[in-house]
Every structure is written in structure tokens, then in C-alpha cells.
């Protein structure tokens, strides 16, 4: 404990030093003027309490030097000789006062009280600094995570396929993640002349965990699609890989199909996914043949459906985030607007407009639109 005593009377100083020496580990610095004490306190890091006479406090106020007490959270115990001096003590904002003559017990009690209060003040200040530093670190970590998530999102979006516009087929996709990353995924590829394979996936949940599962599945698709064209075999392979990689900790719904524009056929498997909507002329068909989601049951017996069409057809595939965001009205909306669309561009614009209007749902939203000539 480091105590500063400001007192001109040397006899009083000697008496106070004798009294204070009974406090174990105390260090006493004595000054006869406020200026000298002020200079010392500016340089000294640790001053626990100040024992000062009223004249020193008045001098500090006159010279506008009491701020040193507040800058360093130093508590002042004023020594007064009469009640009239209490007013000056209050003006100086001293922590406590003691009336002369005082006993050893009185002095030690006042100093210890000031010291305990100083410790509490210092601890409170230290904790504020700790909390500020923790908040700074958390903010820095949050910024880093946001930066990493933004990079991951750019990578995820970069792995989505480009739209296809040719004389055989138009394919366009859009997704809006509920958070930085998405558990929805779409992919397509021309696997042979006049033949196009495509898939839309919705992984259980959303956010980082769902995105990691989706990206691991995405890494399998290019090779799998080029090696295997039968939708049943592709879904079986995806089911096997998902069970092997995630061991029932995650599952996904999927709509996988293959279009042959020359033969005008569509083969597909719907693995627990919302039904795709196929429009030929004025007739709308819901494509729901398939089975349960992928990654739940080994060796599940999925079914596929093969459709033959004669003229141009529109196909709309989507995830359940679209259904949830529109309160279950997504299918009826598509069924209502699709027959009236005069072009694929109008079809896409109508669906995108609906997505953007509903973009603040709790789930990822994805749709893929196709026009097969």
C-alpha cells in the first residue's frame, strides 16, 4: 500500500507515520506542499490513497490540480480541524475526512477503508478493460468470420453452372441463401450430343453445415454425370456416398433428370424433393416419382419415370424454401403464370420477381427453369 501524506507540521507528520506503520507493508511518501505531491503522483504509477490537510486541498483547487486524483482514481482522506472545513472537503470531492486530533484506530480505519475502495475501483476498471478487449477480440473474430464466409460464398457461387441457351434447350438457375452460405445446390452438364443431365439438391438445415454437405456432393457430380446417365444409378451412387460420408448425420432431397432433346424424352428420379412442374401446351404435370430423401436408408429401391413429349415444354424445379416463403402458394403461382408466359425470359423474370419479393424467409430458396424445344 502506497500512501501520500501532505502536511506542513513535522510533528504531526512524525505522529502519523508512527500510527500508519502499524499497517503491514505500507509505504509512506510525505510532502509539505501540494505541488511536490502533485509532481510525484504524476510520475508514480501506484498511489493508493492521499492523506491531506484542508490547506493542501484548497491549494489544489486554486491551481486546478485536483484532476490528478480523478485521472488515477486516487482517493483522498482529508484532515479537518473544525466543522467549517467540511464544506471545503465536499467541494474538493474527497472520499472521506477525519477530524484532528485522531487516534491510531481512527486513522488506520479511514486509510484501510480508502484502500479497499481503491482496490474495488481498480478491479472494476481492470474488468472494464478486460471486457473492452474481449469485445474487441470478438468483433475482430466476427469480422474475420464474415470475411471467410464471404469468400466461401463466392467459392460456392463460382461452382454453380452457367446458364445454357442454345437451339435445343435453355436452362437457368437462381438461389437465395437464408444466410451467407446455402445448403441448396443445382448443377447441370451436357453429357452427350442432345443429352443434358441436371440436378437440384436441398440439404437438411441451412448455413455452414448444410453448405459443407452440399459442396461435398457437388464435388462428385461432374464425374458421376459423365460416367453414368441413368437417373436411378446416379441416385443410388449419391445415396451410397452420402451414407458413407455422413453416416446418417445428414440427408438431402434431390431431383435428378436427363433430357434427350433429339428423342424428346425426360427421365427423372425425385428423391423426397418437392414435385417439379412440367408444362406441355396447356397441360401441367407434377413430377414426383422416386422415393425418400438421399442418405437415410441404404439400398432403398428408388423408382424413375420416363416421359415423352412432342412439342416445346417448360420445366420448373425448386426447393421447399420457396414453398415455405410463399406460405404454400408457390406451386399455384407457377401453375398460374407458366401457361401465360410468352418466352423463357418472361418465365424466368416472373419467378425471379416472386423470389426477390419473398427473399427474407428462414430457409434457402432455389429454382431452376428449363425450356426444352
Image (spheres, grey):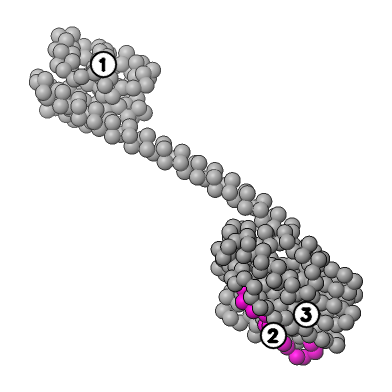
Q: Nearer the viewer, residue 34 or 23?
A: 23
Q: Is residue 298 magenta?
A: no
- Which tag, 3 or 1, sits closer to the chain's start? 1
Q: Is residue 283 magenta?
A: yes
Q: Could you say where residue 289 lies in the image, as x and y percent from the top left? A: 68, 83
The residue where tag 2 is placed is: 286
* Nearer to us: label 2 or label 3: 3
SS class of the residue under badge 1?
Answer: strand
Q: Which mark is residue 322?
A: none
Q: Could you say where residue 58 lies in the image, as x and y percent from the top left? A: 25, 22
| Quadrant in which the C terminus appears | bottom right
**Residue 205 placement, left or right of 290:** left
Magenta region, residue range:
280-293
SS class of the residue under badge 2?
Answer: strand
> Gap in Å between the C-alphas at discs 3 and 1?
91 Å
| Quadrant in which the N terminus appears | top left
The residue where tag 1 is placed is: 27
> Gap in Å between the C-alphas at discs 2 and 3?
14 Å
* Nearer to us: label 1 or label 2: 2
Tell me what residue is drawn at x 26 percent, y 16 percent. 27
Amino acid at each position: 500500500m502506497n500512501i501520500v501524506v501532505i502536511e506542513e507540521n513535522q510533528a504531526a507528520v512524525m505522529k502519523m507515520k508512527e500510527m500508519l506503520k502499524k499497517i503491514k507493508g505500507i509505504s509512506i511518501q510525505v510532502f509539505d506542499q501540494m505541488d511536490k505531491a502533485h509532481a510525484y503522483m504524476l510520475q508514480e504509477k501506484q498511489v493508493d490513497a492521499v492523506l491531506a490537510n484542508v490547506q493542501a486541498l484548497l491549494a489544489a483547487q486554486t491551481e486546478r490540480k485536483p484532476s490528478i486524483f480523478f485521472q488515477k482514481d486516487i482517493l483522498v482522506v482529508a484532515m479537518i480541524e473544525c466543522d467549517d472545513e467540511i464544506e471545503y472537503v465536499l467541494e474538493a470531492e474527497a472520499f472521506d475526512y477525519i477530524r484532528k486530533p485522531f487516534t491510531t484506530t481512527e486513522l488506520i480505519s479511514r486509510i484501510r477503508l480508502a484502500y479497499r475502495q481503491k482496490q474495488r475501483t481498480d478491479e472494476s476498471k481492470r474488468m472494464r478493460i478486460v471486457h473492452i478487449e474481449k469485445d474487441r477480440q470478438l468483433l475482430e473474430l466476427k469480422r474475420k468470420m464474415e470475411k471467410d464466409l464471404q469468400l466461401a460464398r463466392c467459392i460456392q457461387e463460382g461452382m454453380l453452372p452457367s446458364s445454357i441457351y442454345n437451339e435445343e434447350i435453355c436452362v437457368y438457375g437462381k438461389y437465395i441463401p437464408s444466410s451467407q452460405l446455402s445448403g441448396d445446390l443445382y448443377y447441370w452438364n451436357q453429357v452427350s450430343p442432345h443429352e443434358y443431365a441436371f440436378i437440384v439438391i436441398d440439404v437438411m438445415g441451412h448455413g455452414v453445415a448444410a453448405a459443407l454437405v452440399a459442396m461435398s456432393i457437388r464435388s462428385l457430380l461432374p464425374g458421376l454425370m459423365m460416367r453414368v446417365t441413368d437417373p436411378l444409378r446416379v441416385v443410388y451412387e449419391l445415396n451410397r456416398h452420402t451414407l458413407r460420408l455422413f453416416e446418417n448425420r445428414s440427408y438431402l432431397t434431390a431431383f435428378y433428370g436427363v433430357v434427350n432433346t433429339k428423342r424428346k424424352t425426360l427421365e427423372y428420379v425425385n428423391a423426397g424433393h418437392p414435385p417439379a412442374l412440367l408444362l406441355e401446351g396447356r397441360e401441367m404435370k407434377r413430377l414426383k416419382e422416386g422415393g425418400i430423401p438421399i442418405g437415410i436408408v441404404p439400398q432403398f429401391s428408388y423408382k424413375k419415370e420416363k416421359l415423352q413429349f412432342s412439342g416445346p415444354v417448360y420445366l420448373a424445379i425448386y426447393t421447399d424454401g420457396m414453398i415455405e416463403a410463399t406460405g404454400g402458394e408457390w406451386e399455384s403461382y407457377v401453375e398460374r403464370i407458366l401457361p401465360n408466359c410468352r418466352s423463357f425470359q418472361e418465365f424466368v423474370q416472373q419467378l425471379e420477381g416472386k423470389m426477390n419479393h419473398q427473399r427474407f424467409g428462414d430457409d434457402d430458396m432455389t429454382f431452376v427453369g428449363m425450356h426444352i424445344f
